[in-house]
Image (cartoon, helix red, strand yellow):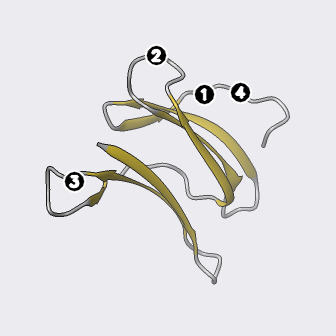
Amino acid sequence: MKVSIFSRFSLSGILLVTLVFLNLIPISAQSFVDINAGLPGVSNSSVTWGDYDNDMDIDVLICGETASGSTITKLYNNNSGVFTDSNIEFAGFG
């Protein structure tokens, strides 16, 4: 199984969405399924994957600009597909 992340910003500036898709091929004919990760929507963004807590679930670091214009850098812990904010502070990063 593979996961992909996608961020989208509407031209009206109203909608910011960050989606995580799980690739089920060859398990299912429907290749990508949104796992409803509940991550914050950001624009001008960057993400990276890694297992920071060594639990064999790939965690995600998200950096970007929120709809309110503030910048964030957040590490989300993945616990079997459920992402929670690790509350780790990144000094000097939004």
Query: Who's the residue at 75% across and 30% down the image?
Result: 90
Task: Characterize the local packing of mark 2: few (<14), some (14-19) or many (20 or more) Cα atoms within 10 angstroms.
Answer: few
Q: Quadrant of the C terminus?
A: top right
Q: Earlier in the sequence, mark 1 or mark 2?
A: 2
Helix, strand or loop at label 3? It is loop
Q: Earlier in the sequence, mark 2 or mark 3?
A: 3
Helix, strand or loop at label 4? It is loop
Residue position for label 4:
89
How far across and how far down the image is residue 54, in percent?
46, 16
Location of residue 37 with respect to 18 vertically, above or below:
above
Mark 3–mark 4 distance (CA, rounded to whole Å): 37 Å
Q: Are marks 1 and 4 in contact (CB under 8 Å)?
A: yes
Three-letter residue code for mark 3: Ile
Identify the residue at the far top of this view: 54
Mark 1–mark 2 distance (CA, rounded to whole Å): 17 Å
Picture disc at residue 87: 1
Is label 3 or label 4 in front? 3
Q: Earlier in the sequence, mark 2 or mark 4?
A: 2
Mark 2–mark 4 distance (CA, rounded to whole Å): 19 Å
Location of residue 37 with respect to 11 vertically, above or below:
above
**Left or right of 92, for residue 73:** left
Is label 3 or label 1 in front? 3
Helix, strand or loop at label 2? It is loop
**Left or right of 56, for residue 76:** right
Quadrant of res 11: bottom right
How far across and how far down the image is residue 43, in percent?
66, 63
Three-letter residue code for mark 1: Asn
Location of residue 65 with respect to 12 vertically, above or below:
above
Mark 1–mark 4 distance (CA, rounded to whole Å): 6 Å
Residue position for label 3:
25
